[in-house]
Image (cartoon, grey):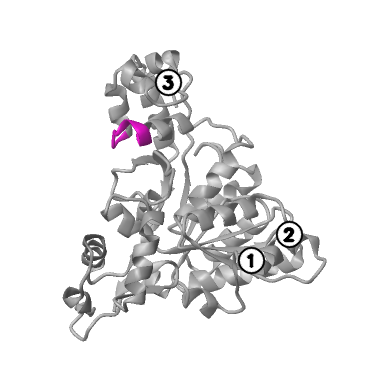
Amino acid sequence: MQVPGFGLKNVRLLLKTSGVKHAEDLFRLSPKEIQKTEGIGQERAKNLSSFSDWDAVDRQIEKAQKLGAFLISQADPHYPELLKQIYDPPVILWVKGDAEALNRPGIAVVGTRNPGRYGLDQAEKWSAKIAQAGLNVNSGLAYGIDSKAHMAAVENGGGTIAVMGSGIDWIYPNRNRSLADRIVKNGGVVMTEYPPGSKPDAGHFPERNRIVSGMSHGVLVVESGIKGGSMITARLALDQNREVFVLPHPLNYMKGEGCNYLIKTGQGKLVQSMDDITDELSIALNGPDTGPNGTHQSSKKWESADLSGEQQQICETIGHDSLHVDQIAESLETEPFKLANILLELEMMGLICQKAGKYFELR
């Protein structure tokens, strides 16, 4: 961010509280309007409202273009739809590669930077299966499990998206430069929310993880200790209403304790075959059933039921589709947790059914 005192967190917060839809509209706000957002004082507000160094912005964009990268905002049709649904989606994304890949269904594959042989083998095996199923393999381009996942996807002809915690011109770790090039050449994407020149700061990686999980239909945790980035990603995925899949590990194996903990506490589903993943995500990936002429088939049983206004609105919103709870909430301009009781009532009335991954459709 070129505005002095303004970081990406400030921008995301201001977008949420100001009522402005697009980042470029923030510059039209008055200092008084800006200061209404908690944590943004007079000096920051003044810096934003009086910002005029657009030449510096142009230089950043030109720098990215020379690298073959480009910028997309939330208004861009290529911006990942799933990513828009999370609590704090990136304001902009710096992208290198095939933008069409950003909205293809995918699974995040995550794990420790220092895996054992079992973890590396499993990362390669499962990433190959995911790629062969026609899904993107999404990860963070780090050493260890991330690198093995990206490589396996490329070698099996699949798409893969690498989300970085640094600028698009600062591939980290440096050893993965050739891997990043292969990802792009094979139709994948290397991307980041950080502007060119941004170093791989330690604080960037937890923020990066929310993007990896947020743009994915589910997260597969391959190997992780009790603490670390993979456990953060798993928690973020749960917060984002994404499915968490976990590979089991031998008892007393320190590098796999996090995986076993997720399974033990019911935070993740133990997976033993690819069916364990695709069965959970069948609605999300394939959409609702269709009739012989390609028309969606869904019951209108709810139309003859005695429903409250809120119940009727939900049924009308779902219609012929299979919608995630976040999509329903967005359509009704409310929060997902506020719909929980109403959705349960409709399920008990036999009017809707919940599919894997918190997707709902009419009976």
Mark 1 or mark 3: name the one nearer the start of the chain.
3
- Give percent across and percent down for residue 112: 69, 55
Mark 3 or mark 2: name the one nearer the start of the chain.
3
- Give percent across and percent down for residue 258: 70, 60
Amino acid found under the numbered disc labelled 1:
Ala
Which residue matches tag 2? Answer: 115
Amino acid found under the numbered disc labelled 3:
Val
Q: Secondary structure at mark 1?
A: helix
- Give percent across and percent down for residue 119: 71, 65
Residue 284 lies in the magenta-colored region? no
Q: Quadrant of residue 294?
A: bottom left
Which residue matches tag 3? Answer: 3
Amino acid found under the numbered disc labelled 2:
Pro
Which residue matches tag 1? Answer: 123
Quadrant of image for the N terminus: top left
Mark 2 or mark 1: name the one nearer the start of the chain.
2
Q: Quadrant of residue 60?
A: top left
Horizontal side of 47 relative to 108 (left or right) equals: left
User: For the point 39% across and 17% down, which residue is it?
Assistant: 45
Is the C-beta separation of discs 1 and 3 under 8 Å? no
